Every structure is written in structure tokens, then in C-alpha cells.
């Protein structure tokens, strides 16, 4: 019985780990009429729920309505009485691609310095 519980816990941890590849800090840039804008994200996955923060030079906003399905996810960001629907996909351990009505953006994982 102890072995069965240990195996079940191991599989539970592995499935949680598989989804947590999205967790962490990410950075990308987007071209705007006013030049290049840097966008930073902090993503946190808990089960099938995505939370986090979206930061630009103009401030930060919470990620809302976040959902995760394997390596794919969706969320909204609201600012200036606008809501932007986004989708994303973890394409590698160090790259995410997000899409919305303004186009596609590649995000790179921000490495923690020792």
C-alpha cells in the first residue's frame, strides 16, 4: 500500500511539473507607433489556472481569466477601459509565443542571476 501511495504522489508531482514550464518571468518586445516597447510577464500556474502580472514602461496590470491546457494558455489584460484577449503556447523551456489582435510576440525566459 505504501508503494502505491508513493507512485501516485510521484505521478501527481510529474503532472504538476509538466504544466509549470510556463511559470516564471518572461520578456518580449512589441513594435508600436511610438517605437519598441518592452513587455515583461510573471506567470504562475496552479492546476489549470494562470495568474500573474503584465508590466510595461507605463505600469503593471494583473493577468485575468487565465487558463492553462498543457502547453497552451489564454488570459486577458485590461487597461484604459480596454480588454485584450491573449493566447499563448510554451514552445520550448525558454520560449513562449503569445498572440492577440495586435499580432504575435515571442517571449524569452528571464534567467535568474546567481
Image (cartoon, rainbow, N blue to C red):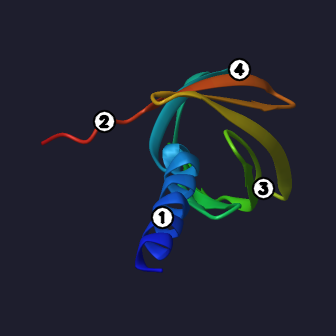
Judging depth in this view, the residue of 87 and 91 nearest the camera is 91
Check whether the beta carbons of the residues at disc 1 and disc 3 lie within 8 A of each other. Answer: no
Q: What is the crowding at mark 1: few (fewer than 14 residues within 10 Å), some, or many (at least 20)?
A: few
* Residue name at image x 55 percent, y 25 percent: 29
The quarter of the image holding the C terminus is top left
* Residue name at image x 82 percent, y 46 percent: 84
* Residue name at image x 48 percent, y 64 percent: 7
Q: Tell me the number on the disc at residue 82.
A: none
| Residue 3 against residue 74 in the figure, above or below | below
Q: Secondary structure at mark 1?
A: helix
Mark 2 or mark 3: which comes first in sequence? 3
Check whether the beta carbons of the residues at disc 2 and disc 1 lie within 8 A of each other. Answer: no
Q: Secondary structure at mark 3?
A: loop
**Measured Cα–Cα span from mark 2 to mark 4:** 30 Å
**Measured Cα–Cα span from mark 1 to mark 3:** 49 Å
Mark 1 or mark 3: which comes first in sequence? 1
Judging depth in this view, the residue of 60 and 91 nearest the camera is 91
Percent x, y for residue 94? Answer: 45, 28
Q: What is the crowding at mark 3: few (fewer than 14 residues within 10 Å), some, or many (at least 20)?
A: few
Mark 2 or mark 1: which comes first in sequence? 1
Q: Nearer the viewer, mark 2 or mark 1?
A: 1
Mark 1 or mark 4: which comes first in sequence? 1
Q: What is the crowding at mark 4: few (fewer than 14 residues within 10 Å), some, or many (at least 20)?
A: few
List the residue tagged with mark 2.
111
**Measured Cα–Cα span from mark 2 to mark 3:** 31 Å
Q: Secondary structure at mark 2?
A: loop
* Residue name at image x 87 percent, y 31 percent: 101
List the residue tagged with mark 4.
33
Q: Tell me the number on the disc at residue 7.
A: 1
Amino acid at each position: 500500500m505504501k508503494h502505491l501511495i508513493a507512485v501516485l504522489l510521484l505521478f501527481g508531482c510529474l503532472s504538476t511539473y509538466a504544466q509549470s514550464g510556463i511559470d516564471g518571468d518572461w520578456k518580449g518586445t512589441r513594435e508600436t507607433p511610438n517605437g519598441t516597447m518592452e513587455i515583461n510577464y510573471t506567470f504562475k500556474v496552479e492546476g489549470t489556472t494562470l495568474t500573474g502580472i503584465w508590466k510595461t514602461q507605463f505600469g503593471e496590470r494583473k493577468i485575468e481569466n487565465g487558463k492553462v491546457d498543457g502547453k497552451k494558455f489564454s488570459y486577458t489584460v485590461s487597461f484604459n477601459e480596454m480588454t485584450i484577449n491573449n493566447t499563448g503556447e510554451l514552445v520550448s523551456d525558454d520560449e513562449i509565443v503569445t498572440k492577440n489582435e495586435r499580432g504575435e510576440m515571442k517571449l524569452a525566459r528571464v534567467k535568474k542571476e546567481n
